Amino acid sequence: MKEILECILKSLVENADAISINQVEKDKLTVFEVKVATNDMGRVIGKDGKIAKAIRNILKAIGAREHKKVTVEFID
């Protein structure tokens, strides 16, 4: 899942080297903490958060297939 998230993010941002993804396991929940360059944060979140919501939906669908709960947090 982390590789898929990284691939999605690299296609959105200009500075792909600044992408940092930290995977945290909490009980039955997997949290991906995403950090990108400050000037790329707008691209990742999108207008009204639509792109961020789409990214979360994709990972939730992949997690559901594996019977896991997944969420994505975007950190400044």
Image (spheres, grey):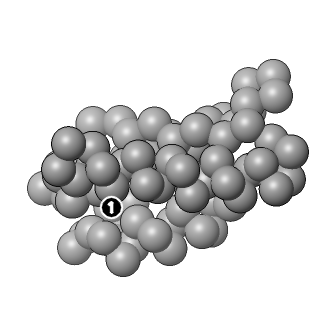
Q: How far across and down, in percent of the image, does residue 68 sit?
A: 80, 42
Q: How many badges with numbers are in the image?
A: 1
Q: Which residue is mark 1?
A: 18
Question: Quadrant where the C terminus lies?
Answer: top left
Whether 57 is drawn above or below 10: the answer is above
Q: What residue appears at the point 64 percent right and 48 percent down from the top-left corner?
A: 60
Q: What residue appears at the point 41 percent right and 46 percent down from the top-left corner?
A: 53
Whether 2 is drawn above or below 17: the answer is above
Residue 49 in the figure: left or right of residue 63: left
Q: How far across and down, in percent of the image, does residue 37 sit?
A: 23, 55
Secondary structure under tag 1 reads: helix
**Residue 58 lies in what quarter of the image?**
bottom right
Q: Is residue 17 visible?
A: yes
Residue 18 in the figure: left or right of residue 39: right
Question: Quadrant where the N terminus lies?
Answer: bottom right
| Mark 1 nearby-residue class (10 Å; few <14, some 14–19, many ≥20) | some
Q: What residue appears at the point 27 percent right and 69 percent down from the top-left corner?
A: 13
